[in-house]
Image: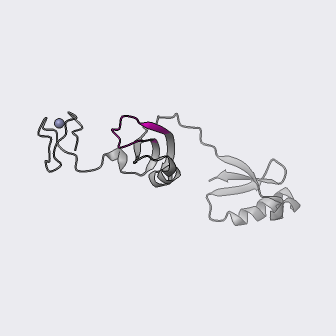
Amino acid sequence: MKCKNCNQDFDVKFNFCPNCGAKKQTELSEKYKNVYGVWSVTTEGDCEGRDIKTLGTHEGYIDDIAFKLADKCYYSLCFSRVEEKEEPLKKEIKEVNITLAIKSGTWDFSPEERAKEVAKIFKGRPVTVERGKYYASVLLKKV
Ligand SMILES: [Zn+2]
């Protein structure tokens, strides 16, 4: 195996690198303990291969991405976690208008009836239902 510290090869039986003394990792790195994330994927030999082909950045579960890209795999697909950028917190949206398709029957109702009937199917969900601003719609509000 290869030492992450000095890049020298050493026998896997050692618990530390005989060249530089760096301790061998015995557990997955924290960032690799969750198979979900944003991954930069490459292929062509192992992850140290010279002619690395980039297969792009993908968000999802490693297995889903791996099977999606399986036809592009040379020997192996190498997953490298992309550090997520700190995004400014989006202002939380508290309400949204929704419309159920005409087949739902809700288009025949008055706005008040519609809100009352639709509220029944959202029972147990963390929203309230009010009459909507737009045609055949209702307004969902977070509670
Ligand atoms: Zn070393």
Q: Please tell me which residue lies in front, 68 or 106.
A: 68
Q: Please tell me which residue lies in front, 96 or 53.
A: 53
Say whether residue 116 is left or right of residue 38.
right
Q: Is residue 89 above or below residue 134?
A: above
Residue range in magenta is: 40-55
Q: Please tell me which residue lies in front, 111 or 48.
A: 48
Q: Is residue 13 above or below residue 22?
A: below
- Is residue 44 part of the magenta span, yes or no? yes
- Is residue 32 part of the magenta span, yes or no? no
Where residue 122 appears, as percent x and y from the top left, is 68, 63
Where residue 12 appears, as percent x and y from the top left, is 18, 49
Which residue lies at the image location 41% right of the left edge and 44% below the top edge?
79
Q: Quadrant of ligand 1?
A: top left
Where residue 107 appears, as percent x and y from the top left, is 85, 59
Which residue lies at the image location 36% right of the left edge and 45% below the top edge?
31
Which residue lies at the image location 35% right of the left edge and 41% below the top edge?
47
Say whether residue 81 is left or right of residue 28.
right
Say whether residue 42 is left or right of residue 103.
left
Which image quarter is the N terminus in?
top left
